[in-house]
Amino acid sequence: MPDKSFLKMNKKKFSREVAALRRTIEEFWQIIPIPLFSTDKKLNILKVGKTFKSFFNYQEKEIIGQNLNKIFFKEKEFKKLKAKLFQEGSLEGEEVVLISQNNKKIFTAVYAKPKKNNSDYIFSFLDISKRKKVEKELQEKVKDLQRFTKELKESRLALLNILEDMKEARNTAEIEKDKTLAIIENFPEGLLFFNQENKLVSINPKAQLFFSTLANEVINRNFEELKQKESFKPLFEVLEKDKEENIKNVLKKEIVLDENLTLEISAISINSRNKRIGTLVNLRDISREKVIERLKTEFVSIAAHQLRTPLSGIKWTLRMLLDEDLGKLNKEQKDFLEKTYNGNERMIRLINDLLNVTRIEEGRFLYKKKEANIVEIAKKVIQPLEEIAKRKKIELTLKADSDIPPFKVDAEKISLVFQNLTDNAVHYTEKGGKVVVSIKYLEKEKEILVSIQDNGIGIPKEQQERVFSRFFRGDNAVKTETEGTGLGLYIAKNIVEAHKGEIWFKSTPGRGTTFYFTIPS
Amino acid sequence: MSKIFIVEDDKFLKELISKKLKSEGFEIDCAMDGEEALEKLKSSKFDLILLDLILPGMDGFKTLEKLKEDAKLSSIPVIILSNLGQREDIEKGMKLGAVDYLVKAHFTPNEIVEKIKKVLKE
């Protein structure tokens, strides 16, 4: 047993050490930066640290002895915490909302441990407001993310659907495209397609054959480039661009590529939804048609010549008989021979007209246009007709403006027009009638207007439409004079129109007819 | 008396035109083809030639060419008397040196005689 003097001597030392310890603990209570407090087993607050006081804004006397629930925001939470504490004996970061003296809410994580020696508790907590705030924001962000993900999933689904639809549409389009391509590739006529920029984007095998070229040599070349290519030059004689740089529409123009190859060209603008997307050029091989035409003309030429030979014989014979070169004739004989002679002349005229008609149809009718004096041409034609007119006691006059300039015309063919119209006027006008040929120069339009007016039998109204057709003769004309061929006006119309002029007439049956035609400069 | 040479292969037409010309006081000779014509023309002097174009063997154009190549014969005026009447034929004939081109079916014998007299006057 330690002796009394040892204990007495060390009591002072122990007291001093205990006091020092007490002071140290007190210091801890003051300086610990987290709120610290202690409660009894009923959770009444016994002691609070300095940080607690400043954190909660409480003075010592306001809080010491108060129950812990005073600093709790929700009574429910307090009850829950209390239950947990009593059940588990400690608290390890329970999240609760505390409240300061000035009603400020503080999110905290509460720690509590029982004191070793008795049933008091030591409480501390961490301010997790910031953490809570971050957690809240994170949650919101997560919610947003989930929403976005959902939207994305829906979008993806929609896109997949669209993709499926597109695949199907594309398949259909591919099939259509293949069909179209097959048609174009196998088309028996040449096809060229220029896009809106006038670049050649398609040339089918037939067209490649015509121009002795391969697709890759000309695809994607533009209008101007192709124009320079030797084999294509004939094509660009008929293909032109308009003011807006679009290729002009062409209707059946002919080009000759070779002595055995003639093509008929047509070009048309292609539109889609009211917008022009390009030009389609069609090339039709009409070589065979040209050969047939040529054969027809040759045939007619040869036939004409062969027919003329015996007809010349007959003409000369009859003429010599009628002129009494071979002996005198009585009146009856003369009459018969006259009629035969006239019939023969008619046949000769018919052959001429037939020849002219085939040449018109072959398109080779107009020869060369040279500057000529229209009035002189008319005079030359009218002069021989004056004989016939005199015999029929018909007044035939020519009136012409004095200031008519020379015009570029095919003189021979224009003579035919004058001849035909004046001939008709004289032949279909009765004795004592009047025929006036007038030539005017229209300054504004820069064209010549010719009119041939008679006061003859006229043209029946129901037949006026057919006047210019081949072999047509009005009923009254046939009765008046048996000799017309019905080709004269058809030929005249063709000649006038080949000169880019117009021909028309006005007629009243029994009163007369006036034929008009124009020749532009 | 002027001498006229006729180159014509159709017997009937040849007879007709010869008869007419004789009755007008001309002296006549004739041939049925180009070769014969050139031979006969070389052996006698003629004042005018009436030349058909469609002939057996050498045609009228070729004959005309040969006529104009020959120094002696080239000065004789040639009137083409044919039933070909296309523009090209007329032009070709005139270019080869013919002084006129008459389509048989379009002219009476009298009119042909007129044309001949006109040419001979020049």
Image (tube, coloured by chain):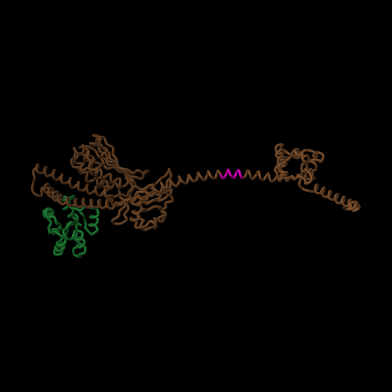
Q: Quadrant of residue A453?
A: top left
Instruction: Estimate the x, y position of residue A242 in percent, counting from the top left.
Output: 41, 48
Pick the residue in front: A348 or A217: A217
**Would residue A55 appear left or right of A321 to someone viewing this image?**
right
Asked if one can make out residue A173 in the rendered structure from this viewpoint, the answer is yes
Q: Colour of chain A?
A: brown
* Magenta run includes residue A147: yes
- Start-end of magenta stretch: A142-149
Instruction: Estimate the x, y position of residue A188 in percent, counting from the top left.
Output: 32, 51
Pick the residue in front: A212 or A334: A212
Pick the residue in front: A177 or B77: A177
* Magenta run includes residue A254: no
**Residue at image point 53% right, 43% down:** A154
- The residue most toward the front is A1
- The residue most toward the right is A5
**Residue at image point 23% right, 39% down:** A395
Residue A433 higher or lower than B21, as above or below = above
Q: In which quarter of the image is residue B48?
A: bottom left
Instruction: Estimate the x, y position of residue A132 in percent, counting from the top left.
Output: 68, 44
Query: Disc count in the image?
Result: 0
Instruction: Estimate the x, y position of residue B85 in percent, counting from the top left.
Output: 21, 52
Pick the residue in front: A465 or A145: A145
Asked if one can make out residue A401 in the rendered structure from this viewpoint, the answer is no
**Residue at image point 39% right, 56% down:** A218
Q: Main SS type for the magenta part?
A: helix
Q: Colour of chain B?
A: green
Residue A86 higher or lower than B43, as above or below = above
